[in-house]
Amino acid sequence: MRSDFKFYSDMIGNATKKVAGIFLAVGLALLGFSILLFVFKMVFIFIAAAVFIAAGIWCVGTAIKIFMSVGGSKYRDSEQTEYRENVRIHYHNR
């Protein structure tokens, strides 16, 4: 008996094999990564801690720079503040 749907079944079979191959590759990658995490968990914890410490130091440094640039103007005397007379700010309303 001759099958008229052989061409279509080959296409579906090839697509199924490709999907199965992708699932196999992803599954093996996940298994390998989880084994590495289990074996080298202290290394990954150290790397994560180093990233958080660096981010924290950067945030504190940025906050200090901002406070220093803005906070100094609060303590200046009004007599010592430099200003220009006859200066107008032009604002175009759009």
Image (tube, helix red, strand yellow):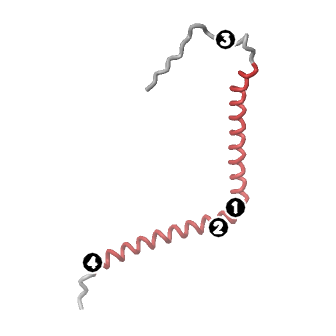
Determine which residue is flagged by label 1: 40
**Callout in the foreground (4, 3):** 3
Q: Which mark is residue 7?
A: 4
**Relative side of 91 to 63, left or right:** left
Q: Earlier in the sequence, mark 1 or mark 4?
A: 4
Determine which residue is flagged by label 2: 35
Q: Earlier in the sequence, mark 2 or mark 4?
A: 4
**Callout in the foreground (2, 3):** 3
Separation of residues labelled 1 and 2 (CA atoms): 8 Å
| Local crowd size for mark 2, using a 10 Å CA cut-off: few (<14), some (14–19), many (≥20) | few
Q: Nearer the viewer, residue 73 or 64?
A: 73
Q: Earlier in the sequence, mark 3 or mark 1?
A: 1
- Report which quarter residue 36 is drawn in: bottom right
Q: Which mark is residue 74?
A: none
Residue drawn at x 72%, y 51% is: 49
Q: Secondary structure at mark 4?
A: helix
> Where in the figure is residue 33, as x and y percent of width and height?
61, 64
Q: State the quadrant of the C terminus.
A: top left
Q: Which mark is residue 82?
A: 3
Separation of residues labelled 4 and 3 (CA atoms): 86 Å
Question: Three-letter amino acid code at disc 2?
Answer: Ile
Separation of residues labelled 3 and 1 (CA atoms): 60 Å
Residue drawn at x 27%, y 78% is: 7
Q: Are marks 4 and 3 in contact (CB under 8 Å)?
A: no
Question: Three-letter amino acid code at disc 1?
Answer: Phe
Residue drawn at x 45%, y 71% is: 21
| Local crowd size for mark 3, using a 10 Å CA cut-off: few (<14), some (14–19), many (≥20) | few
